[in-house]
Amino acid sequence: MNQPGPRFWEVFFEVYESLPRQGPGNRACAARALGLCRELPQSPAILDLGCGVGGQTLHLADMASGSLVAIDSHAPSIERLKAAIAKRGLAQRVSAIVGDMARPVQPLGSFDLVWSEGALYNIGLRNALHVCHGLLRPGGYLAFSDAVWRKANPPPVVKAAFDLDYPTMGWLEDDVATIQDCGFELVGHFTLPDEAWWDDFYTPMEARIAELRVKHANDVEASATLDQLAEEPDVHRRYSDFYAYEFFVARRPLARARADMAEALEQQHAADASRSAPIGELDDHAGMTYPHTRR
Ligand SMILES: C[S@@+](CC[C@H](N)C(=O)[O-])C[C@H]1O[C@@H](n2cnc3c(N)ncnc32)[C@H](O)[C@@H]1O
């Protein structure tokens, strides 16, 4: 397949940048995922990766107090988000930055919550999960959505669309296994309902495409691009039972830190005891290693 040319991308962004969001999702789903992060601090430090124009960033700013850093590699989207932040008077606690989520400049272990809707797959899910794990403090949460297959043997038009956009897309079980492999505990997950595809994404997309068809009526290349972009909502209308967007909430375990501390304390107690107690007394304590080595 030919690589899209510059005119394709101009028209693509003319459509996408104007939408409230650049992928499926809505406020209700964000609220549900946030609700699964039960032990967040009162004012969490939140990082939103691949924020686009910040549809979910603004929802998060509304639903959670604390600070929010939103990152996207597409500068015009960040400009739009900055304007929305300023308009809403959120600049004290929300910042939008152009950046590559594969190479974050934020300090390791500095976030209570890393959020990412429909974006992690761009740098490979496994790679992205390692990046997120590093950015979270122990006990911190990761909330992200990702496309997954839900029915085998998709029609060629569906297979072709995902071969282009997300060729490594797996099944729900694959994502769960990757989450666990990358050192997270899975807290919960749910499938985005159909309205989360339409309300803030495909419905405004189809309206924008209709508007641009008029504007570009005499531009053959732009019209062909609009035809191509219109296929996505249409494919979803016909074949959405073959794929889904799943919202996952996972947690960087506290357990390791706790286990390390418990082990260190146990060793300290055992060392103290071996220095002060008579050997006979210590032999009665089951599970203590030091007395046995001294038999
Ligand atoms: C499908 S859109 C989702 C946007 C937004 N999260 C939403 O749900 O509306 C994916 C976003 O990831 C961004 N992106 C892709 N690769 C990136 C990277 N390496 N670093 C930061 N952002 C990236 C794109 O610019 C795009 O805005």
Image (cartoon, grey):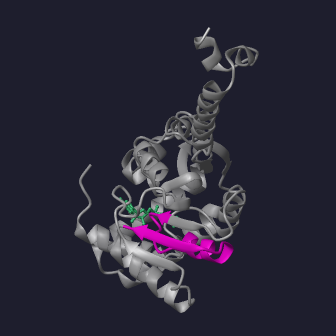
Residue depicted at 42% across the width and 80% down the height: 212
Residue depicted at 30% across the width and 69% down the height: 9
Q: Quadrant of residue 265?
A: top right
Q: Compare residues 13 and 55 and report the one nearer the observer.
A: 55
Query: How many numbered marks appear?
Result: 0
Left or right of 147? Residue 39 is right
Q: Compare residues 174 and 222 and report the one nearer the observer.
A: 174
Q: Is residue 55 magenta?
A: yes
Q: Which residues are magenta?
A: 48-72
Q: Position of residue 163 (x, y in %)?
A: 39, 44
Q: Compare residues 219 and 191 and report the one nearer the observer.
A: 191
Q: Position of residue 235 (x, y in %)?
A: 52, 54
Q: Quadrant of residue 62?
A: bottom right
Q: Where is ligand 1, by quadrant?
A: bottom left
Residue depicted at 29% across the width and 73% down the height: 220
Residue depicted at 40% across the width and 65% down the height: 227
Left or right of 141? Residue 17 is left
Left or right of 130? Residue 244 is right
| Above or below 225: residue 293 | above
Give the quarter of the figure containing the C terminus: top right
| Above or below 87: residue 25 | above
Q: Position of residue 91 (x, y in %)?
A: 51, 86
Q: Position of residue 30 (x, y in %)?
A: 65, 64
Left or right of 17? Residue 65 is right
| Above or below 15: residue 246 | above
